[in-house]
Image (cartoon, grey):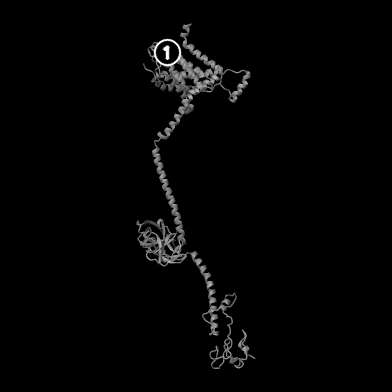
Amino acid sequence: MTGIATDYRRELDIRRYPLAVYVLVPLAALVLQAWLPRLLGRFAYFDLPLLVVLYFSLIRRHPIHGTLLGAILGILQDGLTQGAIGIHGVANSVCGFLAASLGIRFVVENALLRVAMNFAFTLLAELLVVFVTRGVLGLEMHWNLLAQVLVAAGNALIGLVLFPLLDRLQIRS
Amino acid sequence: MESFFSRHRNLIVLLAVLLAQIIGLAVQVRRPTREQAASVAQRLATGSLRDQGGVMLLRLWAAGLVTPPERLFHAIDIGAVHLWSGYLDLVHLRGQNQQLQKTINQLRLEQAMLIEDARQGQRLQALLHFQQSYPGKTLPAQVIGTSGNLQSHLLFIDKGSADGLRTDMAVISADGIVGKVRDVFPHTAQVLLINDQTSGAGVILEKTRIRGILRGDANGQTEVVGILADSRIQPGEQVLTAGGDQIFPRGLAVGTVTRVVRDPDSSAFIDVILRPAAALDHLDEVLVLTDLQSELPAEMEQDIAASQQQQGAAASAELARELARRKAAEELAERLPGLTDPNAPVASGTQSATQPGSQPATPPPAPRPIPTLHPDRFSPGYDANSGAATDATSGSTPAQTASPAAAPATRPPASGQKPQQRSQP
């Protein structure tokens, strides 16, 4: 596994992106998340906003940014549902924070590592959603583990393609 | 203290964010009191449970952020589908178009063939009906060509000498006469139409019974020539074959008079322009009269026999009357040879013969002449030997019945009395 030492991270440059990327990519993720299920129906096994949160958190390696980005995108995701606003915000905030924290310690350039992290964080986000809904808010929620696993797998595969594409948008100094 | 916040800044921010969201969630989903539970349940049941103002604002922002791109995506989707289906996904369209065009052409051809078959069937049906009703023997033939010359109105038919055709056979259709066979080949024949300048046929006008010669003019019109100027000929009159040309049988339709013009060669004659009864320019099937003296159909023979039977009974009655008239005239001539005209008709005999139950063989008594007071040799029934007049009715002389001296003393007998009785004292 490449570069898991902290000293190695310091030697890397922090990637920077144009401001439009920070705005348009999350917005596109939200729109696609709302629009693609019309085409794919019940086979829409992905969570694109979470994938964008994970990417920017891992690349930027800034937990606060990851937390805020996760909170904003999560709240917007909740805003598109009939449920309480903040459930996905909490989950995405936690995932963004953890991803950014891992990004400080690990260099995630390896594709397999990205797939594993995407799968794990997506599953974690789903678990957090269930936890917040059921445990914190005490609301009823039917939960299908297989569907959550499929969502996690879908995110892992999409991240395998999406992350290299987003890497091309960075500003190289 | 400052180092604590700076050291755990990330975690503090995370906790703050989480705490804020949890508080927000708690505000949204806070449990109602027992008094509010019923109303909340009712609002949930009726779907009238609304979010609070801040939550609504967040939903509005989320929707306002996502729906415009979604609308754009939807428009792009529609446009892309339209672009793909209408412009790009046209790989097989040209081939399909050609195939459909071929199908359309084939269907049009089949439709035209069906229409033509239907028309031909109607024509053949009419021709067959005419052939069955026509007493002469006919041979149907198809028109297969023309002369191709405007000055030569000829047709070629698909029957020839092998089929029994000969020259000068009449060619007709169900509508009227067409022409006559001009040349006969083994399997084809040439038909000279009636509107050709070299054709000719004897015709008669139906109402005026004026006869003429049918021929064609330089323009391909059919006209009747050789007619003296007669104001009775009017447009619309039918023209029939006269039957005197030994080609066309009598009574076939020739055409209709359209107008009458003066003969340019002679002012005393007129030309009657006809509209041919047969469509000479659009002939497809014709009938060739192969035998003019053919036997009549059974029905027509029965009709003719019945007609002749009726006519025979009337003729026999007329003959009997004629015989009675002749017999009465003969007897009258025998009895009154000087008074009766043998050629004059006998009215009394005719009247008696027409009465039912009368005996036409017994003539009524003839009128008796007045006896001559002084008969001489010029008196009827005068006997030169005896010097007395004989009775015209009995044939005997007055000397045989009465003396000549007593005769002048008698008055003239009344009608019906015999002279013998009158001469008796």
Q: Is residue B356 left or right of residue B159?
A: right
In front: A169, or B303? Answer: A169
> Please, what is the three-letter code of the amino acid marked with disc 1?
Ile
Label 1: state its secondary structure.
helix
Q: Is residue B274 something one can see in this rendering? A: yes
The structure residue drawn at horizontal position 42% and vertical position 50%, both measured from the top left corner, is B113
Against B178, residue A140 (above or below) is above
Work out whether B338 lies above or below B67: below
Question: Which residue is drawn at the image coordinates 42% and 46% (left, top)?
Answer: B108
Q: Is residue B226 visible?
A: no
Which residue is identified by label 1? A104
Closer to us: B110 or B24: B24
- In the rendered image, residue A101, in percent from the top left (x then y), is placed at 44, 13
- The x, y position of residue A144, in whole percent, is 51, 23
The mark total stands at: 1
- x and y percent of residue B79 in the render? 44, 31
> Looking at this rendering, what residue extends furthest in the top direction?
B1
Q: Residues within 10 Å of mark 1 (few under 14, many from 20)?
A: many
